[in-house]
Image (cartoon, rainbow, N blue to C red):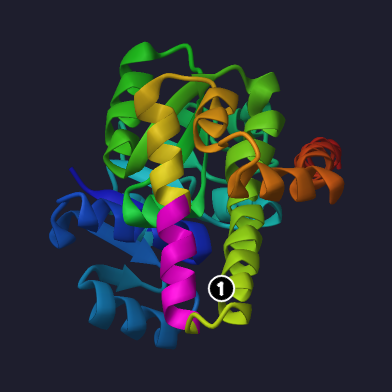
Amino acid sequence: MIIGFIGAGAMGGALIEGFIKSGIEYSNIIASVKTIEKKDYLEKNLGIKVYTDNRKVAKEADILFLAVKPYMIATVAAEISSSIKVGATIISVAASVSKKDLSRYFSGSRIVRIMPNTPVKTCNGFTSVVETENKVVENGVVELLKRVGMVKVIKEEEIHAYNAMAGCSPAFMYILIEAMSDAGVVMGIDRKTSIEMASQVFKGSGAMVLEAGKHPAQLKDGVCTPGGLTIKGVEVLEGKSLRSGLIESIIASYNKSIESEKK
């Protein structure tokens, strides 16, 4: 099975690296990019075959990821429509392109709409898969994407909420990690160790929530000794409105996602 990518930027590149880390052979992944420089970089650093012609990838790929900007989908569709391999599954990563539009662009093809986040690069990602009528195809895509993280099959109308929660929020988490590392530096810890410590705390805390099966508030209370250090820090966070600020940030991304698809 050949997995092809049209586009290997932030999201396409993250998926490619994640698949390689998960054990998929280099020879089973191909991609197309715009420039010779990008082609040479990917071939040298990832070991995959890369073209500068989208049609070549379309001809070879059994599973074809469209990892380009939403505004490019119509152009790419027109370019490759006569080259798509018979029986291929097309997977769109374009955030604001609906199933209806994809079906119009790729009439007669098997199409799945997804939205991964960049941590798929480390096989710790989250991918939303919009449900399809063809459950065999859908299940195959889900099993493939499970190699790079958690997968959730959703209704298409839910995509905006999932975009905001999983697609956008890593940026918010990086800001929090950076802020925590700043605090470490203020206290005299070197920058490298501060970043490592903050990152490990996020990783460990997320794992605790997933594995314990408890509400995050219960786990928080387990760390907060009455009159202790942690509850004092929690008091300050509440005073600075961290909770409401994060909620408002995610909802702002959600509203922007809805706005983008309407255009």
Determine which residue is flagged by label 1: 184
In the displayed structure, does residue 6 sit left or right of residue 238? left
Query: Looking at the image, which residue is at 21% across and 49% down?
Result: 22
Q: Is residue 107 depicted above or below 14 in this figure?
A: above
List x then y, in percent, for residue 105. Answer: 61, 38
- Give the SS element for disc 1: helix
Q: Does the image show residue 33?
A: no
Q: Which residues are magenta?
A: 191-201
Q: Quadrant of the N terminus?
A: top left
Type of amino acid under label 1: Gly
Image point 65% across, 39% down: which residue?
A: 227
Asked whether 204 falls inside the magenta stretch, the response is: no
Q: Count all numbered tags in the image, as a single digit.
A: 1
Decide whether residue 196 is among the magenta residues. yes
Callout 1 environment at 10 Å: few (<14), some (14 to 19), or many (20+)?
some
**Above or below for 260 versus 222:** below
Residue shown at the point (34%, 30%) measured from the top left = 141
Query: 216 or 223: which is nearer to us?
Result: 223
Name which residue lies at 63% across and 59% down: 176
Find residue 15 and report its horizontal and vertical position in percent. Answer: 38, 53
Residues 49 and 242: in front is 242
Quarter of the rendering occupied by the C terminus: top right
Q: Residue furthest bottom?
A: 37
- Is the stretch drawn in magenta largely helix, strand or loop? helix
Q: Quadrant of residue 147?
A: top left
Q: Position of residue 225 (x, y in %)?
A: 56, 36
| Image x and y of residue 125, in percent | 42, 45
